[in-house]
Image (cartoon, rainbow, N blue to C red):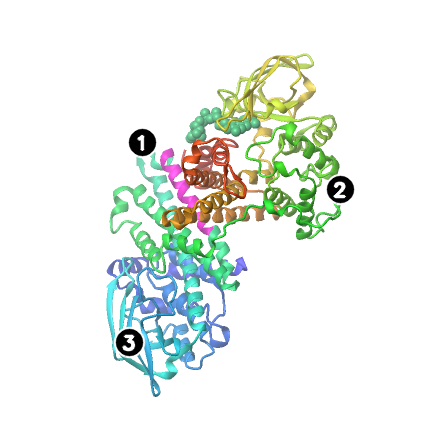
Amino acid sequence: MDSETQQAFKDSARDLIARGDLARRRAALLAGNGALDRDAWKQMAEAGWTAMLVPEQSGGLGLGVPEVIAIAEEAGRAALPEPFVAAAVLTGAVLAAVSEHGAAQALIEAVVSGESVVGIAWQHGIGQLEPSADSPTRYRRDGDTIVLDGTLHFVTPLVGADGWVVLANGSEGLMLVWLAADTSGIELNGSRGIDGAALGTLHLQRCTVQATQALMEGEEVLDTLARALDIARIAQAAELLGIARAALEATIDYTCTRVQFGRAIGSFQALQHRLVDGYIQTELAAAALRDAAAADRQARSELASSASRAKARSAQAALWVTRLAVQLHGAIGYTEEGPIGPWLKRAIALSAWLGNERAHRARYFRLRPAGRQMRRDATGTTPPMDFPRDADWDAMPEAQFRQMVRAFFSAHYPEALRYFPRRLHWNEIAPWYRTLSEQGWIAPAWPKEFGGMALPPDKLIAWIEEQEFFGVGRPPDQGLIMLGPILIRYGSDAQRAQYLPKILSGEHVWAQGYSEPNAGSDLASLRTRALLDGDSFIVSGQKTWSTLAQDATHMFMLVRTDNSGRKQEGISFLLVDLKSPGVTVRPIQTIAGDEEFCEVFFDDVRVPKGNLVGELHRGWDIAKQLLGFERLFSGSPKHSQHALAQLRELAESRGLLADPAWADAYASAQLDVADLVSAYGGFADTVKRGETLPVEVSWLKIWATETHERVAMLLNEAAAESAMCEQAVSTGSQPVHIHAPLFNAMAAKIFSGSNEIQRNILARQVLRLPV
Ligand SMILES: Cc1cc2nc3c(=O)[nH]c(=O)nc-3n(C[C@H](O)[C@H](O)[C@H](O)COP(=O)(O)OP(=O)(O)OC[C@H]3O[C@@H](n4cnc5c(N)ncnc54)[C@H](O)[C@@H]3O)c2cc1C
């Protein structure tokens, strides 16, 4: 998709909508007759909206789903009452498929020009998602005519439309027939849509048309209609996203200006966090939609599952945000003339038509039953190959790079440590660390001059993903991931020469000493003191929660060197040898049952002055430097994917998925993970382009860790009484760890900046809510 073209369509749609009279749109919506404002429809046709999907040779624009999405999102933003999806997208997609048929040309011209407003009538039952080969609307041939009988439901537009393309069934199979509204034998049973749309039931009684009005017959009818419906669902998803975004923005504006208790209500943290959750829903919907945008060129099943995923997420987002918008506007949000009603009602209608969130979850589950396979079976499948220590990684094709890395893991990584359920200790993982070190691959992100691989961003992402797929355990890597880049940027030549080679070889293992008993989220209030005494600092105080410090030889830490100014200004960054006299390391057992972190006491520990990194008192600037692509780690979908694969395995072994409640719960988790994968992909693309990750990446961490926790809880439920037992559950093929995902997810919600702190960051820096 060319995003410039998409942007151009968005801009022109915004222009057109802005030119229209908002008051007219609202009045039409409320009166229930707005769906077929002919003047408005004509303007849309002139802007090309009705011609988008129609091929150029038939007088259309021959565009695709990305452009449709661009317009639909703007229509959603404006709560446009005109039936863009029903009479431009769905109809356009059907007409595009029948455009070769001679009889269709006049109809296409009328639709493209905006002269005719035409709907598609295909549904014969409530909750029906797919067009049926057994449609009870029947046709029979009678000489040069076709006679139709039957009833079609949820037809929109109905009253006021110029006609419909109708799905009918006969002895020769299925048929799509054009039926003008003034054909005798038609009876309309219209109802007023909650969003003002014209919809209802179309009764056909001995309705007779010329045989030439059969636009398509035979086997391709079902496929054509099914494809068109899915494209319409993707457009609906975009319209719903537009609604969600506009309602969220309006609510943010309102909470910034509405004052209660002497403050703008947007400064209340309870409201900020709820707005952030609404924002996350809209971003997920956008991520699902990005994937769906490519689907019109994909195979039928791919299009169907993308459409269901996009529809399910957008419906959830729009209904979530519009309900939140009503709530945060208070009573005014509940009034008919208030700002939220049109969006809410449009969201309700669009969500319901062509399948609601639950229906699409179930459909996605049917279409994507396998989920992600656990990858243990990958062992030994790769042929022997060369593993160069160094190469022009930039020039190497990504597929070749991935294959090489995978083969290396396959050949050297210990099978027993794959997908290990907890953080590995140094004595368990040191041989692998040294293997990578000897290979020259231990520091993929470091520059070559310091012994790294200097992988370009796309290969770095590939490296991480291949490790994740293979289930490679994470060694104590704070030296590699955190300290190394800091020394490269802020350290002295002497520090780089002294420490970097030993990080690479594994001779030094580093722990991170930031947190203290009274300095967690509010890290700048740390109190561990370092006083200069000749050529040394004398360090005293306590660090805590230092991951795997019992395995470490050294600690990089933040210490207080000055108390006189702002608390951020008297902090320094120090390197400490943990064998120094006065250091005591005490491991702490976590609820997961492992000694994963430690508290570390410093009792007048003498640290050489040369171990100060950067300037004295300026350590805060170093500590808060966000470390490039590594920030993606905490948003990686790997944990959720693995837990989902385990859930699938356990649920299948216990026959749970035959239970509709379980199938729905599983489908919900499956969608959450799929959307996480898309969102991660979006941020990974930013890194691959060599750009800095934006602050928005905070929402990825929230969604990744909370999705992981939800899947982990399902795993616990699926285990039933087995959740009482500490050991893994056997499913026949391999052990499933019931508790590890839950504990790991809970930890991840706390470390790297707790999820509440991430919500605060998003509220202030992205949503711009007041302090
Ligand atoms: C498994 C694990 C490994 C860790 N490894 C390391 C390590 O290697 N090195 C290291 O230095 N630290 C490490 N940490 C510590 C981690 O960085 C802190 O736990 C984290 O910053 C939170 O601090 P706290 O535990 O003191 O919680 P607190 O800051 O006391 O927070 C308690 C609760 O209050 C919430 N809260 C606090 N302030 C606000 C606010 N302003 N608004 C809303 N909610 C708020 C928090 O989100 C949390 O839910 C680790 C932690 C864990 C769990």
Residue 573 makes an appearance in the image: no
Pointer 3 residue Cβ closer than 8 Å to ligand 1: no
Q: Is residue 699 magenta?
A: no
Q: Position of residue 581 (x, y in %)?
A: 65, 12
Residue 69: which quarter of the image? bottom left
- Which residue does the numbered mark 1 point to in the structure image? 262
Q: Is residue 680 left or right of residue 363?
A: right
Residue 211 image offset from top left, x and y in percent = 37, 83
Helix, strand or loop for the magenta stretch, by majority: helix
Q: Quadrant of the C terminus?
A: top left
> Residue at the location (44% across, 70% down)?
224
Q: Amino acid at mark 2?
A: Arg
Image mark for residue 149: 3
Q: Magenta stretch containing residue 282, yes or no?
A: yes
Question: Which residue carries the number 2 mark?
Answer: 389
Q: Secondary structure at mark 2?
A: loop
